[in-house]
Amino acid sequence: MRIAVFGANGPTGRRLTDQALAAGHEVVAVTRRPGFLPARPGLAVAVADATDLAAVDAAIGGTDAVLSALGARFSKETITTYSASATVITRAMARHGIKRLLAVSSSIADPNWRPTGAHFFDHVLDPLVNRRLGRTLHGDMRRMEAVIRQTGLDWTFVRPSGLFEHPVVTDYHTAETSADGVFTARADLAASMLRELAERRYVRTAMGVITTAVKPNIAKLIWDEGVKKK
């Protein structure tokens, strides 16, 4: 399959690109910074801003599916990365007749998501990180989902919990709408997207994905994902 990956230079996008190539897919890595992607068999690089309709239209031509791993940093300012790119990408997909879209969102997009037994999360992490530091970011994720829901595409929202780095894929868990857990390794997030691309278990709904085999250092996770400049 020929796959367009948006956000291919980001931490999740790099995992997704590597795993897709290893699985035998052809990958069109859509990025604004092509110099960071080494040449490899099966990999094509398209230089495009995900909010530039002409550039996105040119980048995804001839692909069979689009996987978006676009992301933004926490900010007090209004964030539009997710919703603006979703508007452009879905329009370009419709023009090319590309139906399959998987877009990374968050468990926070499910208003009923509350992980079982996660007292520290419920009383410390969620109010501090998600409801305060991540308020504008998660708001735009919800707008992205609303944009995509209005299309006729075969979409899947991929909703991880707190993202962290782990070198290998684990025995991760998926569930419809959101999954009962606090953390998701990026390797597992990427693997779940590629599996869903093949299995189509969550078409036109959301797929929660969590990691249970390993856990991150919480202080490092907050610093890496919400504070540190990249």
Image: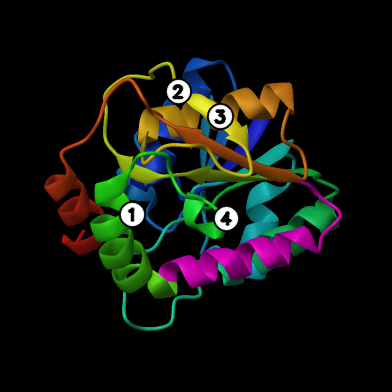
> Is 124 part of what is drawn in magenta?
no
What residue is disc 2 on? Answer: 172
Cα distance, mark 1 to mark 4?
A: 15 Å
Specify the quadrant that holds the N terminus.
Answer: top right
What residue is disc 3 on? Answer: 174
Residue 184, relative to residue 222: is it above or below?
Answer: above
User: Which residue is nearer to you in this view: 217 or 165?
Assistant: 217
Please report whichever mark, 1 or 3, sits nearer to the chain's N-terminal start.
Answer: 1
How many numbered circles are shown? 4
Mark 3 packing: few (<14 Cα in 10 Å), some, or many (20+)? many
What residue is disc 4 on? Answer: 110
User: Which residue is nearer to you in this view: 95 or 74?
Assistant: 74
Q: Which residues are magenta?
A: 137-155
Mark 2 packing: few (<14 Cα in 10 Å), some, or many (20+)? some
| Colour mapping used in the image | rainbow
Q: Where is residue 193? Give x, y as percent.
A: 57, 32
